[in-house]
Amino acid sequence: MELILLEDIAGLGYKDDIVTVKGGYGRNFLIPQKKAVVASESAKKVLAENLKQRAHKLAKMKDDAVALATKVGAVKVLIKTKTSSSGKIFGSVTNIQIAEELGKAGYEIDRRYITLSEGIKNVGTYTANVKLHKEVVAEVEVEVVAE
C-alpha cells in the first residue's frame, strides 16, 4: 500500500515522502491517526506541486541547519555526575541531560533529535549525534566527569 506521509515517522520516513507499507499498518494506524493519506494519482500531483512551491523554503531550512550544525558541532558538552570510586556512573547519562546542557549553551534542541550510539555508564568522552534536518546530522562531543 502506497501512502504519502503527513508528518515525520521514525523508521519509516519524513513528511511528504511516498512510502510503501503493509495494508493493515496503513489502514488501521497511519490513516486513522492522520499521519498519512493514500497515494492516489491526484494526491501525487498535488504533492508534486506543493513540493515545487516549497523547494526554495526547504533549501533555506537546510542551509540554516548546516550553519547550526557547524556551531553545535564546535560545542563540547560537560556533564558532571555522581560516580563510584571505580568511575562507574550511578545510572546513566541520557539525551535529556545532553539537551539541557546544550540549552544552557544557547542551543534549544529537542531531546528526541539527540541519539547516542551507546549507553553512557562510565566517566569519559563520548559522541552524540544531533539530527537538525533530515539530511544534516551534527556530532557533539560529550565529556562525562565525576562531581
Image: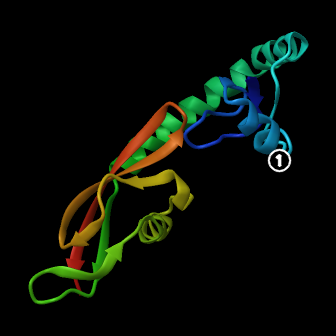
Residue 145, position in %: x, y? 21, 76
Q: Is residue 66 left or right of residue 90?
A: right
Residue 62 position (above or below residue 35): above
* Nearest to the observer: residue 138 or residue 27: 27
Q: Is residue 134 visible?
A: yes
Q: Is residue 38 left or right of residue 139?
A: right
Q: Residue at x 75, y 36 (%)?
A: 24
* Nearest to the observer: residue 7 or residue 58: 7
Residue 141 position (above or below residue 4): below
Residue 126, position in %: x, y? 24, 58
Give the residue type at disc 1.
Answer: Gln
Res 1 quadrant in image:
top right
Residue 65 position (above or below residue 143): above
Count residues near mark 1 (Cα–Cα under 10 Å), then give few for <14, some for 14-19, many for 20+: few
Residue 74, position in %: x, y? 33, 49
Res 8 quadrant in image:
top right
Mark 1 residue element = loop
Q: Residue at x 76, y 26 (%)?
A: 4
Residue 143, position in %: x, y? 24, 66
Disc 1 marks which residue?
A: 33
